[in-house]
Amino acid sequence: MIRVLLADDQVLLREGVRMILENADGMEVVGEAGDGAQAAAMAVALAPDVVLMDIRMPDVDGVEATRLIREAAPDGPKVLVLTTFDLDEYVYAALRAGACGFILKDTLAPDLLSAIRAVARGDAMVAPAVTRRLIERHIGADGDPLPRADTELDGLTGREREVLVLVARGLSNTEIARRLFLTEGTVKGHMSRILAKLGLRDRVQAVVLAYECGLVRPGLT
C-alpha cells in the first residue's frame, strides 16, 4: 500500500485527487494539507511514502516545504511536485530542494497514478531533457554554469563522467548503451556508482549537478 499525503491550497483539487487515489488499487490518502508549513509537519508526523506537493501555496510554498521535509527526514517521504506549467519558475528550485520530480496539474488519472507509483519505488519523474530546459531557463543568458565546483566530480572515472554527460543531455540508459557500445545493465551500474559517489538520490539530481558544475552547457549536444 502506497501512503500519500496531499498538499494543495485548493480544496477542490485535493478532493479530486483523493477520489482518484481512493479508487485506485494499492493507494491510501493518509492526510491533506492546505499550505506548505502544514504539509511539512504532516509529512514528518505521518511518514507517508509520497507527498503530492503543490508548488505554489501561500506563506510557505512547495519549495520551502520540500526543503523542510528533506531536512527533517532525509530518507523519508518522496516529494512529487504538482505544477501548472512544465517550466514553472519554482520547479527547478524544488528539484534542488529534494523533490523527486514533477507532474502537471492537468495530468490524466492513469498517468498520475503511474507517477506516484514510480516515485514510491525510488524512480525520478522528470525526463532529463525537461530538466535540461528548466536549467537552461535558470542559467544566465551568458551561459555561465551555476556556482558549483567541478572538483565535486573528481571522484568519477572517465567512463562515469562520460555517462553523466550523456544522462545530462537527455539520453536514456538504452540510448547511452548504444552510444558507448555497452550493455544496458553496465550503464545502470555506472549510474548507480555515480549517484553513490556524488551523494545524490536520483537521476534528476545528477543532471542538475552536471549543469551546475559546468560539465554540460545549455544548448550543447
Image (cartoon, rainbow, N blue to C red):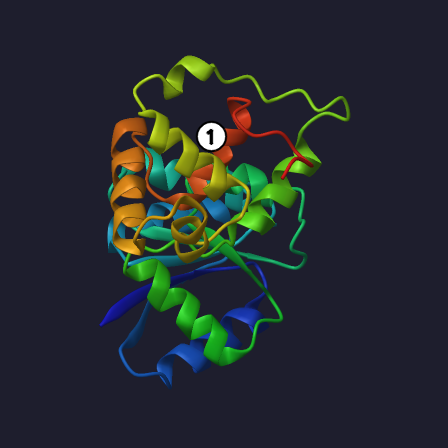
- Toward the bottom, the furthest residue is 23
Residue 217 lies in quadrant: top right
Q: Residues within 10 Å of mark 1 (few under 14, many from 20)?
A: many
Mark 1 residue type: Leu
Whether residue 95 sits left or right of residue 41 in the image: it is right
Q: Is residue 108 visible?
A: yes
Q: Position of residue 188 (x, y in %)?
A: 29, 49
> Which residue lies most toward the front here?
181
Callout 1 secondary element: helix
Residue drawn at x 47%, y 14% is 149
Residue 83 image point, x, y percent: 60, 57
**Label total for image:** 1
Residue at horizontal 45 percent and vertical 48 percent from the top: 179
Quarter of the rendering containing residue 138: top right
Quadrant that contains the C terminus = top right
The residue nearer to you, when weighing 62 against 112, is 112
Image height of 205 relative to 113, above or below: above
Whole-percent x and y of residue 107? 57, 71
Residue 97 seen in the figure: no
Place residue 50 in its image quadrant: bottom left
Residue highlighted by disc 1: 209
**What is the x, y in percent for residue 140?**
72, 25
Q: Residue at x 58, y 49 (%)?
A: 129
As drawn, the residue found furthest toward the right would be 141
Q: In percent of the image, x 51 and y 40: which residue is there?
A: 168
Quadrant housing the N terminus: bottom left
Q: Is residue 90 above or below residue 16?
A: above
